Amino acid sequence: MKVREGESIPEWVMESVSPERMRTMAALLRDPNPIHWDRDAVDALPLGLGKRTINQGPLGLSYMVNMLHEWAGPGCIRRLVMRFPQVVLDGERVTARGEITGLREVDGQQLAECNVRLEHDERGVLLEGTATVAVPA
């Protein structure tokens, strides 16, 4: 695959963040925090989010991983560092986006340094960070 610095990574879209997946993830992680499965618990917080459950960080991060895997293939991620400036809410349509900021070769393998983010059309950037991705030849 030929890539260039400044190129965009193809977007990956989650049409609707699933509250059922949040509930399942809470059970798998043994996460007792009701904000991931109880809309009334979220509504009771002074955050102004209404009755919408809050996605776990690993689920939001997985949307970025999906984008990178679809672009460069499974196992391509060498490093991923994320910040979580906003929460992801159930029912939201979110889009993972990224750009190549640099290229280098290590041991015969081309690595792309990338800026990545998860965006909501109205609320802006929800997650942001950097990734190092092995680009297939």
Image (cartoon, helix red, strand yellow):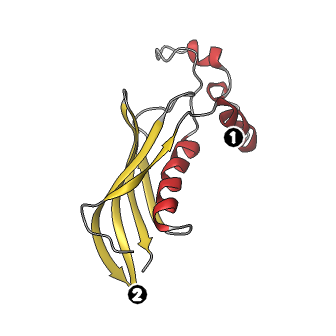
The type of residue carrying mark 1 is: Met
Between 134 and 48, the one nearer to me in the picture: 134
* Vertical arrangement, residue 23 with respect to residue 128, above or below: above
User: Element type at marker 2?
Assistant: loop
Q: Which mark is residue 85?
A: none
Residue in view at x 40 percent, y 55 percent: 10
Q: Which residue is mark 2?
A: 107
Between 110 and 30, the one nearer to me in the picture: 110
> In this figure, what is the number of numbered marks?
2
Assess disc 1: are there few (<14), some (14-19) or many (≥20) residues with their C-alpha within 10 Å of its C-alpha. Answer: some
Mark 2 or mark 1: which comes first in sequence? 1
Labels 2 and 1 touching (C-beta < 8 A): no
User: Taking 59 as reference, is 111 left or right?
Assistant: left
Mark 2–mark 1 distance (CA, rounded to whole Å)? 38 Å
The type of residue carrying mark 2 is: Asp
Residue in view at x 43 percent, y 50 percent: 82
Point out residue 92 in the picture as x, y percentages from the top left corner.
Answer: 51, 29
Point out residue 53 in the picture as x, y percentages from the top left corner.
Answer: 60, 25
Q: Residue furthest left?
A: 6
| Quarter of the figure with the C terminus | bottom left
Which image quadrant is residue 51 in? Answer: top right
User: Taking 85 as reference, is 5 left or right?
Assistant: left
Q: Is residue 124 visible?
A: yes
User: Taking 71 as reference, is 55 left or right?
Assistant: right
User: Element type at marker 1?
Assistant: helix
* Vertical arrangement, residue 72 with respect to residue 106, above or below: above
Q: Which mark is residue 25?
A: 1
Point out residue 133 in the picture as x, y percentages from the top left corner.
Answer: 42, 67
Assess disc 2: are there few (<14), some (14-19) or many (≥20) residues with their C-alpha within 10 Å of its C-alpha. Answer: few
Between 44 and 60, the one nearer to me in the picture: 60
